[in-house]
Image: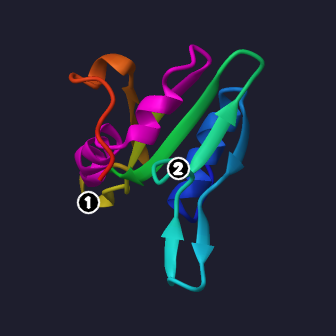
Amino acid sequence: MAKGSSCARTMAIYRKLGYTVEKVEYWCGFSRKRKDFLGIIDVIAFNDSIIIGVQDTTWGQVSVRRKKILASPLAWEWLQSPHRTIEIIGHKEPDKSVGRHRWEHKVIPITQEDFKNGRPDEK
């Protein structure tokens, strides 16, 4: 498993699953903030049949990221293609005091069905 950043761990996980992976989040020097692709995607993973927009975060922030994605009209638009999906991957640091020595992760898929009222309004 990749050491270092959460994004590096995410990319290693998807590569191990056989996807081609590219980081699409970038640092904006003008605003001094990180910018996600479409405001919601840090990594794109794809193969010959599917494109996954991945939101990378910590274990404890998964529900916050899910809420952010479900409020995004661009996320809804992304999911209109049957060849695109969105996943949130949350990482949890090893807790060696209880015998855990490896990073854990959970993947939460976001589907069209998660958008209860259809396309969210622009803010």
Is residue 29 or residue 55 the one in the foreground? Answer: 29
Q: Which residue is found at the position 29% from the left and 46% from the top?
A: 62
Is 96 on the left-hand or right-hand side of 22?
left
Q: Is residue 88 among what the camera can see?
A: no
For the residues marked 2 and 1, what is the alpha-carbon distance in whole angstroms? 39 Å
Q: How is the image coloured?
A: rainbow
Q: Is residue 50 among what the camera can see?
A: yes
Residue 38 on image: x %, y %: 52, 50
Q: Which residue is mark 2?
A: 38
Residue 54 on image: x %, y %: 52, 41
Q: Which residue is mark 1?
A: 97
Total marks shown come to 2
**Sequence-wise, which precedes: disc 2 or disc 1?**
2
Q: Read off the magenta span.
A: 60-85
Q: Which residue is found at the position 37% from the left and 57% from the top?
A: 93
Chief secondary structure of the magenta portion: helix
Is residue 108 or residue 81 the one in the foreground? Answer: 81
Q: Is residue 96 above or below residue 22?
A: below
Q: Residues within 10 Å of mark 2 (few under 14, many from 20)?
A: some
Tag 2 secondary structure: loop
Tag 1 secondary structure: helix
Is residue 13 or residue 56 the one in the foreground? Answer: 56
Is residue 36 or residue 94 the one in the foreground? Answer: 36
Is residue 64 a member of the stretch shown in magenta?
A: yes
Residue 73 on image: x %, y %: 39, 39
Residue 87 on image: x %, y %: 45, 33
